[in-house]
DNA sequence: TAGTTGCTCAGGGGAATCCCCGATTGAGGT
DNA sequence: ACCTCAATCGGGGATTCCCCTGAGCAACTA
């Protein structure tokens, strides 16, 4: 049985074109050109993959994905847009889309993208792929940190709690030491990291995602 | 002209197998089974795509990618590994790999992955794709935040600077207002967000990535 | 043994923070 | 005209933060 695809786009001509191109290989179970019809249609027909336009008058693709993803988590969404703006990509991925391609894509590539989405791959236009990977690489803590090595274990304990926004008094109670000892440790940390106050320290820690 | 591929793996039998499978479609310009030979070979043969094992005795794939990426930024790397651990994936992407697939992949899929890497796509095994997307979605600031709406524009100005670790005095100077006005705004923000001090505020902001 | 390092604590002082109490101005709505 | 609210400032006080000097104790090193 061929992959069931549902199309959502407010440009009917484009919708017709895509339908004609994909009809050979896939089973187009339905189409919609506004958000409400899309949500209803997708819930009824339960397609494998939904091809969805990002920009639509009444809320856009995000509203559709969010409306359906909760009740039908197994349905995959591939965003199809004229825009390659970062905000649009982010919004769609955050909503739950598994891929994002621009409308400059050719018919074979689109068919291939749908196949890949269906088996679980994430699909992005080449230019967007780099963007996504960069954001991904920057999102993760770098475990090995030479700056942290110069701190003693106790100093790191204090650092973690300070970074979480605790006052000296609270840190002291949590570690069962005196406030004065906390002050000493904080001073050492500030000196070693060349920072001037606990606010900069908190910022330093948040950049390295020490939480 | 067919795509030039370079193979790096310390398991020579695996290397031979991959070479045999790919030789029809691609031009295998060289192979290596350790880090140094890989860096030398890649620099000499300038392949389009490098298929690289993540785990190798003397440093692993990360060392190879980092060693080559600076001098030859146009060479694409596809990580090929038995491991699907998050740290390995992160390390390779951070180093500069454009894709990551596990060794359970079949010959056709691998060929397809190489083709896609070559044209600029990012390629991941289905399971890893979800992981990468989740991390990506969590990495980006959420523009629309209901909590932020209750704050006035000026309060948000102050909030941003406080979150960056500036003292009241510095915030006052940057915004050309009095310290007392800064205090007023901070107090309003703390009350509205139900926080008790600027440290918690900084933490609140860093969680929402308001920087 | 002598020296170093990490962890602990104290006193004191100056700065910063936070919260009261107010106040004025201006823009916008009823 | 009246009210509300955002934005601006001030005094004063309690608390917290940051730095300085100084010191005891344990553990490891030379």
Image: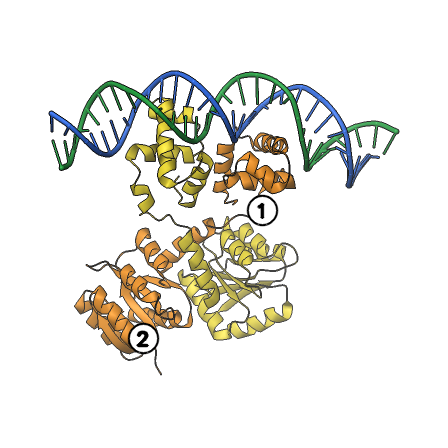
Chain colours: A yellow, B orange, C blue, D green
Q: Residue A143: x percent and y percent?
A: 32, 47
Judged left or right of residue A184, residue A92 is right
Q: Residue A207: x percent and y percent?
A: 43, 45
Q: Callout 2: helix, strand or loop?
A: loop
Q: Residue at x 37, y 23 (%)?
A: A180
Q: Mark number for residue B144? A: 1
Q: In this view, does B25 lie above or below A129?
A: below
Chain ID at mark 1: B
Judging by the rendered image, the residue that carries numbered circle 2 is: B46
- Is the N terminus of chain A in the top left, top right, bottom left or bottom right quadrant? bottom left
Q: Is residue B208 above or below residue B52?
A: above
The lab-note entry on whether marks 1 and 2 share a chain reads yes
Looking at the image, can residue A1 be seen? no
Q: Quadrant of residue B66?
A: bottom left
- The Cα–Cα distance between marks 1 and 2, rounded to whole angstroms, is 46 Å
Are discs 1 and 2 less than 8 Å apart at CB? no
Judged left or right of residue B101, residue B171 is right
Q: Is residue A84 above or below residue A146?
A: below
Chain ID at mark 2: B
- Is the C terminus of chain A in the top left, top right, bottom left or bottom right quadrant? top left
Q: Callout 1: helix, strand or loop?
A: loop
Q: Which residue is drawn at 48% across and 33% down?
A: B199
């Amino acid at each position: 049985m061929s992959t069931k695809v549902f199309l959502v786009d407010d440009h009917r001509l484009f919708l017709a074109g895509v339908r004609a191109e994909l009809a050979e290989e896939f089973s187009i179970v339905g189409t919609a050109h506004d958000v409400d019809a899309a949500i209803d249609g997708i819930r009824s027909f339960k397609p494998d993959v939904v091809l969805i336009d990002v920009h639509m008058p009444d809320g856009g693709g995000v509203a559709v994905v969010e409306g359906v993803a909760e009740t039908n988590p197994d349905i995959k969404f591939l965003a199809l847009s004229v825009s390659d703006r970062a905000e649009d990509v982010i919004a769609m991925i955050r909503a739950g889309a598994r891929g994002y391609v621009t409308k400059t894509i050719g018919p074979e590539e689109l068919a291939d993208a749908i196949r890949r989405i269906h088996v679980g791959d994430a699909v992005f236009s080449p230019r967007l792929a780099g963007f996504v990977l960069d954001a991904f690489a920057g999102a993760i803590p770098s475990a090995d940190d030479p700056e942290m090595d110069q701190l003693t274990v106790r100093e790191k304990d204090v650092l973690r709690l300070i970074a979480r926004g605790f006052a000296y008094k609270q840190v002291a109670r949590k570690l069962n030491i005196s406030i004065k000892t906390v002050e000493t440790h904080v001073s050492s940390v500030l000196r070693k990291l060349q920072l001037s106050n606990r606010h900069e320290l908190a910022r330093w820690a948040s950049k390295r995602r020490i939480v």
